[in-house]
Image (cartoon, rainbow, N blue to C red):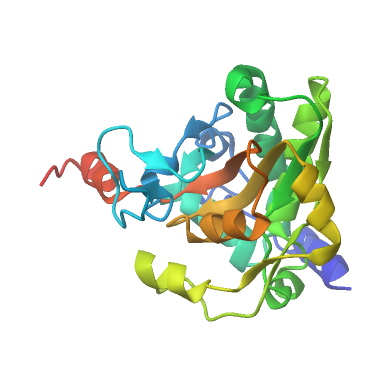
Amino acid sequence: MRTYLRELSLLLVPQSCPGCGRYDTPLCARCAALFSTMPRRADHLAPRLVLTPEGGDSGVTAHHAPRTRLPVWACAPYQGPVRDVITAWKEHGRGDLTNPLVALAGAAATQLVQQAADELSVSDGATVVVPVPSTSTATRRRGFSPSAELARVVAQAHREVGRDAVVIPALSTAKKSTQKTLDARDRFANLHGAVRLIHRHRDVIAAAQRIILVDDVVTTGATLAHGLSALAPSTGTFVAGFALAITPGAKSRQEHSGNTT
């Protein structure tokens, strides 16, 4: 019923692109172009993925090729029109954005699989694609899971270039307080014990040689870090992350605004 009412509302009230306000299109070509079809390595922008030389959390963005918990590729910085589009999709009932955003993510994933072959093809066997879970409350409110939609096209991108891939919803998220108003340290603490490996998927994850964790937006990397810990992959398993967008680190935001102090 919720889906029917949403589709009916689209017929009665013309939608506009949430990135720029252009009418009669859910996502205009200019705003869609901000989601690069060739995602870039971005894990160095996520404080909770960056490690110190001793192996602990740095808590800040490192400067010179920092070591990270896992490589993460993202399509766009989570700012400006990109932020507006994703927020409308996730929080404002814009289900009409699902198809264009998923298509963009699929194109990006295809390019990633083709061009990052050395890093993504370290072993034979199927790639296990694991969506980062939303809480059940958020999924019911939205009527869909953003990360699950994205995981589906990441797996499809592998199959389109002749590689086996399967989506396994191996993680669950317990109810927690909102992450939106928390800083990097508090986000990490808030998720402690909340992300768990579902028991029936333990054997599949233990046998996997290649795992891709998929999220819609990476802010500090806390969710991906806890997801990686919950999966506890076997030694030698290659694990990577893929996201639609990532929040720029402090250094990147300053450079973007022209402030280098």
Q: Does residue 233 appear anywhere in the picture?
A: yes
Q: Residue 125, percent across and down?
A: 81, 29
Please tell me whether residue 168 is drawn above or below residue 32 in the rendered image.
below
In the visual, does 248 lie left or right of 94?
A: left
| The furthest residue to the left | 261
Q: Quadrant of residue 170?
A: bottom right
Q: Residue at x 50, y 36 (%)?
A: 34
Across and down, in percent, residue 69 comes to 47, 46
Q: Residue at x 28, y 47 (%)?
A: 253
Residue 211 point in image, percent of width and height: 69, 41
Picture quarter with the N terminus:
bottom right
Which percent across, then down, holds residue 93? 67, 66
Q: Nearer the viewer, residue 119 or 180?
A: 119
At horizontal 73% and vertical 70% (from top left) the residue drawn is 139
- Vertical relation: 178 (above or below) 167: below
Would residue 78 be found to the left or right of residue 63 on screen? right
What number of labels is visible?
Answer: 0
User: Foreground: 24 or 195?
Assistant: 195
Nearest the camera: 55 or 192? Answer: 55
Vertical order, 125 against 245 (above or below): above
